[in-house]
Amino acid sequence: MTRLRSLFGTSTIAAIAIAFVVALVVPMVLGSGWVATLTSCALYTLPAAGVGLLYGELRLASLTQIAFVGLGGWIALRFGIGFGWPLPVLVVVSAAVTALFGAALALPALRLRDLYLALVTLLVAASADVAFNAAGFPNGGSGFLGYQAFGDLQRLRRPAIATTDDGYFRLTVAVLVAVLLGLVWIRRTSLGRSWALIAQSEGAAASSGIRVTRGKVVAFAIATGTSGIAGALMAANLGQLAPSTFHVSNSLLLFALVVIAGSRSPAGWVIAALLYRAVPYFLSERGLNGHLATMLFGLAVMHNLISAPAGLADQLAGVTAKLRTRRAVAP
Amino acid sequence: MISIAELSVDFGGVRPIDGLTVDLDAMVHGVIGPNGAGKTTLLNVVSGFTPPSGGSIVIDSIDVFELSADQRARWGMRRTFQTEQLVDRLSVFDNVLVMAETSLPRPARHDASMAAIEFVGLPSASVAAGSLNSLERRLAELARALVGGPKVVLMDEPASGLVGHETEQFGALVQRIPVELGAQVVLVEHDLDLVSTVCERVAVLDFGRLLAQGPTATVLAEPAVRAAWLGEALT
Ligand SMILES: Nc1ncnc2c1ncn2[C@@H]1O[C@H](COP(=O)(O)OP(=O)(O)OP(=O)(O)O)[C@@H](O)[C@H]1O
Ligand SMILES: [Mg+2]
C-alpha cells in the first residue's frame, strides 16, 4: 500500500476506489440505456486521454483521435471475425498497429507547427473517414477487407467473462483504469520529463540531450495506440461498427471537449468523454435534441478560454480545495 | 579549446556572424559586445540551434558540425539561456535529472543530479522550480548544465536579473567550474565587473566580427573597445 501510494499518490488511489465503486454500483442502480451510454463514455475516455496527452504534455493538437478508434475497431473486427482471435489479443494487436500508424503519421507531420499540424491531422481524419465509407467494416466477407453488403453478416463476440451489458461495462472500466494508470505513470518517467522540457522549449530540451522528434513521435504512438485499444473494445462491445461513428467532426468535437475539461488530468479526460456521450444522451432522453449539446459546448469553450484555461477538472479541484480549507477553518 | 574559423551565419540578408575567426583558449573565456553584436547567435551556432552558412568550429579535435544539438549536449556541450528555461511544475531535482537521464547510465543519475544541485548551492532539491527566485532559477539551470560530465559550458548573460551580491555569488561559482569539474566556460555577459572578475581572457564582437581579444584587463582598456562597447567617443 505504501509502495502504491509512493508510485501514484493518494488522489490516484482515491480515483481507483471511485472507479471500482462506479463499476460495481452503476449497473445495479441505472437502466440498460445508461449502462450502454456509460460504457461508451469509458471507451471514449481512451481517445480523450490520447488527445490530452498530446495537447496537455506537448501542446500538439491532434484532430485524428476518433479516426484511430475506427482503425483499431477495423483491425479488431478483421482479425476477430476473420480468424477468431480472442479479445485480449485483438486489443494488443489493435493498439500496436494504430501506434505504428500514429508514429508513421507523426514523423512527417511533426515538421509542421501548431495550426499546420492540426490541419494535417484533420485531413488525415477526413481521409480515414472516406476510407471507412469506401471499405466498410469487416463483417465476415471475403478478401482483404472482409466486408460484404449482403449475406451472412457476422458480429464480433464479447469475451466469455463479460457477455452481458453489465459485465462488459465493468470490463471496460477495468481496462480504462489500467490504461490511465499507465499514462499517469509514463508522465513520471524520463519520457514524461522529456515531454515537459520539450513543451517548455525545444531548444532547452535539445540542449539537455533530448531527442526532440523521437519524444514527440513516441507521444503520438502512445496516444494513437490508446485510441486503438478503445476501437477494439468498442468493436467487441457492439459486434459491428458503422463508418458514421468515426466521422471527422467527432475528432474535432472530442478535441474541443478535452480542452474544455482539462487536458492534463485523468479527471478532465473522463469529463470530456461524459460531455461527448452522456450529455447528448441525457438531452435526448428528455426529448431534447442531442445536438443542443454541441451548442452548449461552444459556449463552454468560450467560458473556458476566458475563465479556466486549465480546464473544468482544474476548476473542480479548486472548489474541493476551497471546501476543504473552509471545513478546516470552521470550528 | 574552441577553435572558430571563418564562421558566418546568414539570416536572409542579415549577417549576425560575419567571417569570425577566433580561438576561445581560456578555461573561463568572456565574450562581450554591444546589443545585436551576434553573441547569442554565436552560442546558438556552437550549440547547434542555428546552422552556419560557412566556416568551422572544432572543439578538442571534434568537428562540432557533424553532431546535432542533442548529440552535442550528450557529448558534453552544455548551455544556459538568456531567459532561463526551467519547467516550473517540475521539482528542481527533476529539472536537473532530465540532463542526467540523457547523459548518464541509470544507477549514476540520482547521485549526479544531487551532486550538481549541491555544487551550485541550492538548499532544496524537492521544491518546485516555479517557487524559486531569479538567482535560484539561474542556479538550477546551471545545475542542469553541469550534470553528467560537461566539457564546455556556454552561458548567455547569466547575471541579467541578478543584483550585486547575487552576481558575486554566481561569479564565484563560475570560477569553480573549470577547477572542480574540468569544463571550459564561455561567458557571454554585459556585466563588465563580472567579466573582469571571472574571465582570464575575453573576445569582443561587433557586427559579427572580432574586434579584439586578449587578457581581460588589457582588452577592456583598449580605446576601440570602449568606443564600440560603451559608446564612448574616441579621443
Ligand atoms: N532568427 C533571426 N532572424 C533574423 N535575424 C536575427 C535572428 N536572430 C538574431 N538576428 C539578428 O542578428 C543580430 C545578432 O543578434 P544576437 O541575438 O546574436 O545579438 P546579441 O549580441 O546576443 O545581442 P544582445 O546583447 O541584445 O543579446 C541582430 O541584429 C539580430 O536582430
Ligand atoms: Mg543575446
Image: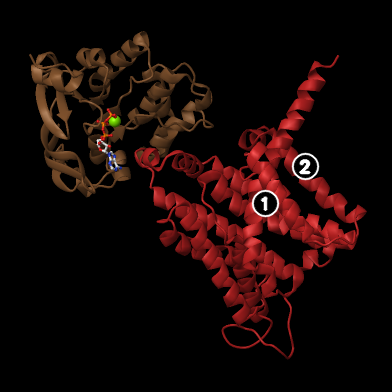
How is the protein colored in the picture?
by chain
Say which amino acid is labelled 2. Ala
Chain that the image shows in brown:
B
Name the residue type under label 1: Leu
Q: Which image quarter is the N terminus of chain A in?
A: top right
Which image quadrant is residue A129 in?
Answer: bottom right
Is residue A97 in sight in this rendering? no
Can residue B3 be seen here? Answer: yes
- Percent x, y for residue B217? 13, 13
**Residue at image point 66% right, 56% down:** A254
Q: Which residue is drawn at 34% across and 12% down?
A: B169
- For the residues labelled 2 and 1, say whether their Cβ atoms are less than 8 Å apart: no
x and y, in percent, of residue A227 in the image? 61, 60
Please report the residue visible at 86 percent of the width from the left and 14 percent of the height from the top.
Answer: A331
Residue found 49% across the figure and 23% down from its top: B125
Q: Residues within 10 Å of mark 1 (few under 14, many from 20)?
A: many
**Number of labelled discs?**
2
* Residue that label 1 marks: A257
Q: In this view, does B225 lie above or below A50?
A: above
- List the residue tagged with mark 2: A17
| Direction from residue B197 to residue A134 in the image, left or right | right
Q: Nearer the viewer, mark 2 or mark 1?
A: 1
Chain of the residue displaying label 1: A
Mark 2 secondary-structure assignment = helix
The residue nearer to you, when weighing B177 against A313, is A313
Q: In this view, does B99 lie to the left or right of A47?
A: left
SS category of the residue bearing label 1: helix
